[in-house]
Image: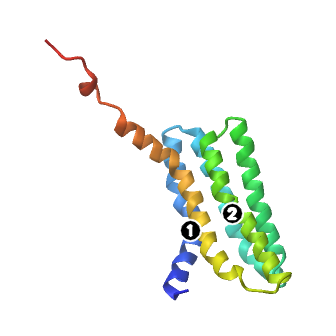
């Protein structure tokens, strides 16, 4: 991988919370609490991951626990989002899309664990370093989807002048 790509990925991976901050603000201002809850939970999990990553790497010198913890974190996020989707606390369509985007993360974490320790191979290195940032980017995009839908809906609705009946 080129150095510029790895540098770009490291900057993005450390700033997911920063990238979602405008979404939280906008959804709160527009009183879209379903989208706000989804983005807030995602921010909380990104923040938790950012805080615990370095200490988990220090503790886990055999490269086992980090992948189990990260897979468990992704599964817990998916479970909470699914529960909130069923209870109408977040948009159900956003919940489903979020599940579809994030399902690759725990699978990839566990594949990386098995690849490193059971098979003692390095197949997962390139796949892991390439797909995990895309999964995180996809998660951020899913958080912004209600805002995109709002702007698309506003641009498709006719204005009052266009929808007024013709005058005689």
Q: Name the residue carrying label 2.
A: 104
Residue linked to disc 1? 15
Residue 167 sits in quarter:
top left
Residue 117 picture location, percent across and down:
84, 82
- Res 91 quadrant in image: top right
Q: How many marks?
A: 2
Quadrant where the C terminus sits is top left
Closer to the chain start, of discs 1 and 2, is 1
What x and y, as percent, mark residue 142? 56, 53
Q: Position of residue 23 (x, y in %)?
A: 51, 51
Tell me the residue at 57%/60% (across/down).
138
Residue appearing at x 68%, y 82% in the figure? 125
Q: Is residue 40 left or right of residue 121?
A: left
In this view, the residue in front, 38 or 156, is 156
Q: Quadrant of the N terminus?
A: bottom right
- Above or below 163: residue 56: below
Tag in front: 1 or 2: 2
In the image, 55: left or right of 41? right
**129 up-or-down from 139: above or below:** below
Task: Determine the secondary structure under disc 1.
Answer: loop
Residue at horizontal 55 percent and vertical 76 percent from the top = 9
- Using residue 151 as the reference point, say whether residue 2 is left or right of it: right
Q: CA distance from mark 1 to mark 2?
A: 21 Å
Asked if residue 107 is positioned above or below residue 113 in the image, the reply reads above
Residue 161 - label:
none
């Amino acid at each position: 991988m080129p150095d510029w790509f790895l540098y770009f990925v490291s900057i993005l991976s450390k700033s997911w919370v920063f990238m979602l901050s405008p979404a939280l603000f906008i959804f709160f201002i527009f009183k879209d609490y379903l989208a706000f809850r989804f983005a807030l939970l995602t921010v909380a999990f990104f923040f938790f991951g950012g805080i615990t990553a370095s200490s988990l790497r220090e503790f886990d010198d055999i490269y086992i626990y980090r992948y189990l913890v990260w897979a468990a974190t992704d599964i817990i996020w998916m479970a909470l989002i699914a529960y909130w989707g069923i209870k109408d606390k977040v948009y159900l369509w956003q919940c489903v899309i979020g599940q579809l985007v994030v399902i690759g993360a725990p699978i990839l974490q566990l594949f990386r664990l098995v690849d490193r320790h059971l098979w003692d191979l390095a197949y997962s290195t390139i796949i892991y370093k390439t797909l995990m940032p895309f999964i995180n980017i996809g998660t951020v995009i899913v958080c912004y989807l209600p805002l995109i839908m709002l702007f698309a809906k506003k641009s498709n609705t006719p204005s009052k002048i266009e929808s007024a009946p013709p005058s005689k």
